[in-house]
Image: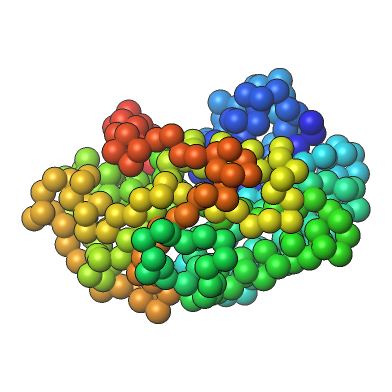
């Protein structure tokens, strides 16, 4: 297949790229490197099936038009997005343009060329969970940040192309994903930041009380899920979750990583209004429709991530 992957130089994107290339498909990656890094995909640049790495933005309609016209993509994994909650609060326009308007431009090209779309959304669109069976796709949404709001808007547009035009589309909502190649600085995920601080002898800072929970999905499990959604007709027109099915309080996560309570410090939350107190995924739909389930435990995933950061990672 000819496949376009937007955001392919990002953390999750590079693992999706690796999986697609392993399966023998011809791949083009489009990324403006505002969040992704070319170092993430340097090992793929000489791969015979990576037919192009294009540094460009999904907001460039002329660029998109030329790409789709020339390459005849059969499948588009759309991962390119602004993903930082605080950035979306500080500058909602940029997030809306990238996540909603940019998605519209992608959808228009896919409609014209009859290209299936796998749209990467987020668990941050959900209201908090009180049920120990976890959050299923029918759970109420609550866009508590402009990031979540932009994603909800884009989700609805993606699904509208399925209903209005019969275009095969699927919305995927992976839960908090972590693993090798995630940034260890301020823009990174909590696991990578905690491990990096632990290895450097620094304190682990937790926003708020630390009782908020997260369902942490190892990145290779996430990439298997993302790729599978593109090759299944069973999920067309659907919203599908993926998570570990186990949540952990941030306080407990910090102790799991450092083992030293004296190094765990609590700081004032930067966006308490957008915090989701409990995130626990119910992935039964993905298991039923895609035969997907996570394979890497939290402890094993943390060990793999720690080993990668210890070995030098990407700073």
Residue lying at 32% horizontally and 61% vertically, measured from the top left: 213
Query: Is residue 51 toward the left or the right of residue 304 in the image?
Result: right
Relative to 93, say whether 299 is above or below. above
Could you say which quadrant of the image residue 251 lies in? bottom left
Relative to 42, say whether 164 is above or below. below
In this rendering, the count of numbered labels is: 0
Query: Is residue 50 toward the left or the right of residue 268 in the image?
Result: right
Visual colour scheme: rainbow
Which residue is outermost to the left? 262
Q: Can residue 142 be seen at all in this image of the molecule?
A: yes
Residue 158 at x, y = what percent? 74, 61
Relative to 133, say whether 46 is above or below. above
Query: Is residue 191 toward the left or the right of residue 57 in the image?
Result: left
Residue 2 at x, y = what percent? 79, 33
Residue lying at 55% horizontally and 39% vertically, measured from the top left: 292
Residues 34 and 288: in front is: 288
Residue 217 at x, y = what percent? 43, 46
Residue lying at 60% horizontally and 30% vertically, measured from the top left: 19
Which residue is outermost to the bottom? 273
The C terminus, quarter of image = top left
Q: Can residue 14 be seen at all in this image of the molecule?
A: no
Residue 237 at x, y = what percent? 74, 56
Residue lying at 75% horizontally and 37% vertically, measured from the top left: 3
The N terminus, quarter of image = top right
């Amino acid at each position: 297949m000819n496949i376009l992957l937007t955001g392919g130089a990002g953390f999750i994107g590079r693992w999706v790229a690796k999986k697609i290339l392993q399966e023998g498909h011809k791949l083009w990656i489009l990324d403006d490197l505002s969040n992704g890094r070319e170092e993430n995909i340097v090992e793929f640049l000489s791969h015979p099936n990576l037919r192009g790495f294009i540094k460009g933005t999904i907001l460039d309609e002329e660029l998109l038009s030329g790409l789709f016209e020339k390459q005849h993509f059969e499948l588009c994994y759309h991962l390119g997005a602004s993903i930082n909650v605080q950035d979306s609060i500080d500058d909602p326009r940029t997030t809306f343009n990238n996540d909603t308007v940019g998605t519209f431009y992608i959808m228009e090209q896919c409609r014209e060329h009859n290209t299936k779309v796998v749209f990467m959304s987020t668990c941050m669109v959900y209201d908090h969970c009180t049920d120990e069976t976890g959050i299923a796709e029918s759970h109420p949404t609550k866009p508590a940040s402009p990031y979540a709001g932009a994603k909800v808007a884009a989700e609805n547009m993606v699904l509208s192309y399925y209903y209005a035009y019969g275009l095969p589309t699927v919305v995927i909502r992976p839960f908090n994903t972590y693993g090798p190649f995630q940034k260890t600085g301020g823009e990174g995920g909590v696991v990578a930041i905690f491990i990096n601080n632990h290895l450097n002898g620094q304190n682990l800072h937790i926003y708020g009380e630390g009782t908020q929970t997260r369902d942490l999905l190892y990145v290779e499990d996430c990439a298997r899920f993302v790729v599978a959604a593109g090759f299944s007709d069973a999920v067309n027109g659907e919203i599908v979750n993926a998570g570990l099915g186990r949540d952990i309080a941030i306080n407990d996560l910090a102790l799991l990583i450092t083992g030293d309570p004296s190094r765990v410090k609590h700081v004032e939350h930067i966006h308490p209004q957008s915090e989701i107190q409990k995130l626990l995924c119910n992935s039964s739909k993905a298991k039923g429709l895609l035969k997907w389930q996570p394979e890497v435990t939290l402890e094993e995933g943390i060990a793999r991530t720690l080993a990668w950061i210890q070995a030098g990672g990407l700073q």
